[in-house]
Image (tube, rainbow, N blue to C red):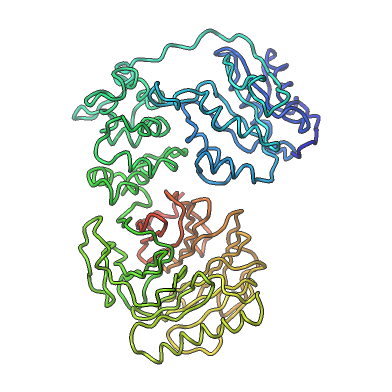
Amino acid sequence: MTVGMTVTPDIAAWPPLDEDKRAPGRQLLDWAADGAGSRLCLVRGAEGSGKSALLAWLLAGTVGRPWLVVHATVPSEGLTTETFAWELGRQLGYGPLSPGRMLDQVAADERPLLLLVPDLHRAGAGPADLPSAAPETLVAELLEPLLALPHLRAAVEVGTSGLLAAEGVEAVEVVEVVDLGAGDGAGAEPAPYAELVAAVPRTADGRPDWAQAPDTVLRRVLDAALRTDGPYDQGGAVLGLLADPGFLVHGSATALTAVLADERVPVPGRLREVWRRAAPELTAYHTDSAERAALLHAAAVDTDPDLTEYLRPLAGQHWWSAVWARRALPVNALALVPGVARGLLAADPTGRLRTYDVESGTALDASGATASPSSVGASDAAAAPAVHPASVRPRSLAPRDARSALLLDRSDALLPLVTEDDPTTAFALERIAEYHGSAALAGEESLVTALGSGGTRSPYAVVGDRGGTVHVWSLGEYQDVPRSHRVHEQPVTAVTCVDTTDGLTLTFSAGADGSVRLWEVSAEPMPVPVQERPYRTTGLAAADTPAGPVLAVAWSDGEVHLWHVFTGRVRVLPWLRDCDSLALTPEGVLVVGDTAGLSAVRLRLDVLWEQ
């Protein structure tokens, strides 16, 4: 729907409504279709009057009608400013963002946006004495700033409250009001904590079986515990819930996020730090308990050993689970090292290069031998950085072996790195750097924008440039010129390649337009992208696994996609942070580099492609 455009909708084409709801339904639908009308519609009414059902009716009727698009529907019961912003960001395609970043992103969004906000009057969570427990805080911190944006319209359910009253919303000159009047009576009193806990089935040893608890209990029990003995009782109901890993996996993620945000609430171990790391993803709609366990387990590895071990069995049932993490240093470039069994080369933003064992995260020295203890959280100090000029800040790596590599510097220059006296290797790497340096001087379209590596029979370097061309170089033998093909219409942002058991060399590349292309180097590139999304690709990695070739793609919205090359099947791995680089082993270990350091997850290749 375009701002300023009015469409006269046919209410008869919408799902049926009871007779007493037809008039307010007609009013709400006319408001939604009138792009030139008021930007705020308040849906009022007493408990049980059908307010949420009316918004759901409007949303259901928009399916298949491109002239009326609802861009996000955020049920607000139990949400704080932060958790509301995360959910709105997910639905608008930005990923979970902080409230400030969310406002900036919506302000920069060129789409005319239509939002539905059910249950605003029930927003708020956490201890009652904090602002986050009141819906007025969400209104002041996020909704009113959103409504100040001229390209955003919202229909908001407010019950009988005075939230977003016309005189209180300065940015909105005219407010539409849909009033459903009286309902079927006041809402029921909140159930006490003891009653809710009594409804939870028990395990054979008498512990609460949260996996079998009713949904209402899971949503309400933490709030009831706060009312029972206060949030700061060292031995009370709140701490009992927080100390129960089963409740952490099954309980309300939004309620847990609000309670753990209060530093006064006592918590076991380092739960607050672990939860904060996982909360943006845990508050998404993950109904699979094994996936929630996998996310929480991934956040606990290298931080809370007790919670890590408790969650490991359940996380291990999922199709991915974390195996190790090293969060001492940020990592912005990764590559597997040819010739070093299980060797992984990583670069941090200062330019330091370190080598790790990809299966355990143990730091290795330049020869591939163990350089530091393998215990979780061990220091990286013993992992000797490779020798290279102090001015180099590599953002991509293409190792030839443990002693030499091609680097793509932040200045967009390709640089050879040879740590031993090896004139033959130095000459081959210098030839690649010289070739692309000369091409860039001849035309800006040849400026290098991406560097990747791959190959098992022989190591390769893959170079992408601003003009959309991909160049493949052998690092195992000297080449005077690469195999090249223009694959993209826009600059290349990431590249990688893989050898297959049937002799193919598959090259994958991502363009600035969000397309991922496949090129088998002895043939023409595929005529259409293998994947295309409205986001930037931040990393690519590929491996020939027992299940066949697999491509891992990291996107700027935080998702990591795993693509089975020969069948086209895709699985989405929800990651906890923005991903800056990837590495994938043939055994199915995926390593993620980001601002927090290194994390490795094991993919269960036997079930990865099951739906």
Q: Quadrant of residue 234?
A: top left
- Against 219, residue 284 (above or below) is below
Which image quarter is the N terminus in?
A: top right
Looking at the image, is 5 positioned above or below residue 366?
Answer: above
As drawn, the residue found furthest toward the bottom would be 423
Residue at the image point whose x is 44% and y is 37% from the top: 283
The residue at the far front in this view is: 391
| Percent of width and height locating residue 455 | 43, 76
Left or right: 486 as drawn, with respect to 300:
right
Nearer to the camera, 420 or 219 = 420
- Identify the residue at image location x=39%, y=43%: 278
Point out residue 497 in the picture as x, y percentages from the top left corner: 49, 72
Residue 335 found in image quarter: bottom left
Q: Is residue 3 left or right of residue 91?
A: right
Residue 555, placed above or below residue 169:
below
Judge left or right: residue 362 versus residue 153.
left
Q: Is residue 58 left or right of residue 198?
A: right
> What is the number of callouts on the image?
0
Q: Residue at x 22, y 44 (%)?
A: 306
Q: Position of residue 525 (x, y in %)?
A: 61, 72
Locate residue 87, reporting x and y percent. Answer: 52, 38
- 119 over 582 or under it: above or below: above
In the image as oriented, which residue stretches furthest toward the left?
Answer: 205
